Amino acid sequence: MAASGKLGTFRLPPLPTIREIIKLFRLQAVKQLSQNFLLDLRLTDKIVRKAGNLTDAYVYEVGPGPGGITRSILNAGIAELLVVEKDSRFLPGLQMLSDAAPGKLRIVHGDVLTFKVERAFPESLKRQWEDDPPNVHIIGNLPFSVSTPLIIKWLENVSRRDGPFAYGRTQMTLTFQKEVAERLTATTGSKQRSRLSIMAQYLCNVQHILTIPGRAFVPKPEVDVGVVHFTPLTQPRIEQPFKLVEKVVQNVFQFRRKYCHRGLGMLFPEAQRLESTGKLLHLADVDPILRPRQLSVSHFKSLCDVYRKMCDEDPHLFAYSFREELKQNKSKNQEKEHKESYRL
């Protein structure tokens, strides 16, 4: 690795603009993949600045596309930048950047949903979870179609301290549709409060740090874009397995306009639903007529802790799915109707 003094002074040589790169390689955003290119380097510089101090950092960029944010990261004094790009059309333009920044840019043609980033950077970067975050950052202008499943995947990695978080409390700076950014950061009682709010906030400090107007992108999306910064917490606000928390939160928010007892009831088989829901709410000390958006992370902690005890007492409870029960009941009713019509 080069000395940090040299890293700090590195600047890319003059290169074709992003617009010229798009023209040169005949790149077009694919609507089905919800691709939108950010061409204004002042804005890409701003996103990278918001990620924090990147001097000597190892950065993992997801969805670099034609390389706008990639350029800004390379100019930020980093030690190494790893980009993972699924769309092969963007590889020649990224290779041009790699040639202009020898030893700085590593390109992987692959899928961020399956790429094993925990093997990508030196072991020496790893920090204890309780320590300051490692000098590893994730930055990305995500296609809208993958942004939600990807952040859920990474939040599960945070809970298990693996994947990108095998290095410690790796920070993430990512773009989302503005509405999704608002959900991720929504406070208790807010209209935007949702499943994403709880899943992100019980594991991370989450900040909506920047809004970029849709007109800055090509093609222009119908919505503005929010940039969100995530720093994993040293101690999660709910200390239960990710899948258990996810199940409780999903059930509550599937009836977001109803009282919370409605969604919580779906955690239990029909025969015991009323009694078990009452028990859960009583032991968790949660008012059954609060709306889902009125529930704080502390409320969800209590609900998850009590639900976990109930699952420990009944080993079959966690595997229960009310949708599966509905399907089975429907099938039984159809079979019954068929038998009755046959007798007639």
Image (cartoon, helix red, strand yellow):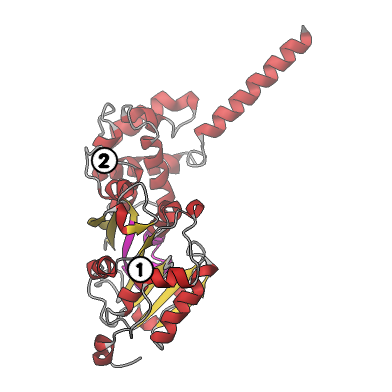
- What secondary structure is marked by label 1? strand
**Residue 277 vertical placement versus 124 (above, below):** above
Residue sitting at x 74%, y 15%: 339
Find disc 1 in the rendering and name its residue.
138
- The one nearer the camera, 144 or 319, is 144
Q: Amino acid at mark 1?
A: Ile
In the image, 178 versus 284, the foreground residue is 178
Say few, some or many: other residues with alpha carbon within 10 Å of mark 2 (under 14 / 14 to 19 / 20 or more). some
Residue 145 in the image, given as x and y percentages of width and height: 45, 52
Q: Which residues are magenta?
A: 157-175
In magenta segment, residue 155: no
Disc 2 vs disc 1: Cβ atoms closer than 8 Å? no
Q: Residue at image x 36%, y 74%?
A: 17
What's the residue at 49%, 56% (across, down)? 30
What amino acid type is highlighted by mark number 2? His
Q: Which mark is residue 299?
A: 2
User: On the image, which quarter does residue 235 sit in?
Assistant: bottom left
Classify 10 Å Cα crowding around label 1: few (below 14), some (14-19), many (20 and above): many
205 sits to left or right of 90:
left
